[in-house]
Amino acid sequence: MSRFVWTFALAAGLAIAVSSAQAEEPAKEQIQAMTSAQPAVAEPAAKQEPKAQDAAPQAAPEQPKKAEPTKTALACAHPGALGTSRTITVAPDAFPHIGTMQYRESLPLEDHEVVITFDDGPLPPYTDRVLDALDAECVKVTYFIVGQMARAYPDTLRRIYNAGHVIGTHSMHHPFSMGRMDDEQLTREIDGGIVAVKAAIGDDRAVAPFFRVPGLARSRQVEAFAASRSLAVWSADEVADDWFHGIKPAQIVERAMRRIEAKGHRGVLLLHDIHPATAMAVPMLLKELKANGYKIVQAIPAGDRPATVPERTPEQIAAARSQGWPRVIKASLKGHHAHKHAHAASETDDGFMGKLAGKKKHAVASAYEINEIFNR
């Protein structure tokens, strides 16, 4: 069964992380130099988000009328660190849709406040490097987890939570076609992803009712389905194109900062913790945000959450990994993805990457074109 699950995840496009890492070999070599003390581990592949185009400077996003109370700055043991200035409680009834890339409203952030989010993971070793960088600056963020990735790396997922970050979900298999799915398919992807993440993390209360649509492929049906599950649907205010093949860490930082500045010096930033370039960019980005007077805000769910979730010991993790990683095998694929996945699995990595990159460009262009229709 585990082989089947792994095959499905790889064929669904999660293999994009491995190919992206190959395309960014210089960055990967630098990461390995930074982390020579820890052996590299086998990587499952993961999907990425589509490209967002630069926009002309805009006014600060319209603020929702209902805002939950916020808390004071979180404690930080590192003097001089950027830190997390405050938290804001996000309830789905108060914030059903978040992010001005696709919606009228975003989170009620003040001048020079940023909420950082990461999609598509977890994927060691890159997720681990991102976590290290966040910890060094006492920055808390929100992760949107793919169900299949949670199943593959439950220990990394639990480390994310126990480091103080918030866990949302990002579907089961990261399909780009969610905007065209019916309720039965949405149940498999949205509910299935939530179930997988809850099982991997070990405590249902540790998973926030936050959902981001893969590829930002929104539709009224997706939004209605999410509302029926009491989920807040997240888009973003800014992206940094960190899924681009060959993009350099400095370029990720430059694009993130330029777009935050253009959106009224605030916003929800979307990144991906599955790429070597992003892992290298995060420390640089945090340094740049601090130098420019920005503050980090963490969005948290309403209600009680466990302080921590159980983690396995390093010895238990090593023993589990010694059994071997899932391998790619041919299997019978059922459902609406079958033909596409069977064909993709037979292609080379480069060919598969090229097709996926084209899909991303098309997806984001479509998202921008239909925004006006949704926002009337």
Image (cartoon, rainbow, N blue to C red):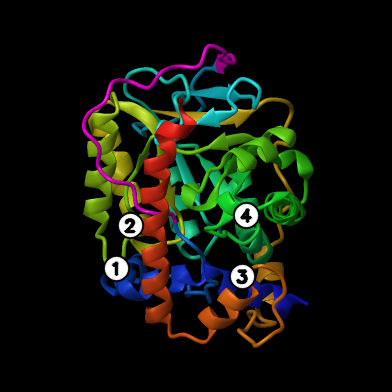
Where residue 44 appears, as percent x and y from the top left, is: 55, 72
Disc 4 crowd rating (10 Å Cα; few below 14, some 14-19, many 20+) is many
Among numbered discs 4 and 1, the one appearing first in the sequence: 1
Instruction: Locate residue 168 relative to residue 62 in the image: left or right.
Output: right
Q: Which residue is mark 4?
A: 157
- Residue 30: image tag: 1
Quarter that holds the N terminus: bottom right
Q: Which residue is mark 2?
A: 280
Q: Amino acid at mark 2?
A: Met
Disc 1 crowd rating (10 Å Cα; few below 14, some 14-19, many 20+) is some
Q: Residue at x 22, y 52 (%)?
A: 251
Range shown magenta: 49-70
Q: CA distance from mark 4 to mark 1?
A: 24 Å
Where residue 168 appears, as percent x and y from the top left, is: 61, 43
Q: Residue at x 28, y 21 (%)?
A: 59
Residue 115 showing in the rendered view: no
- Residue 9: image tag: 3
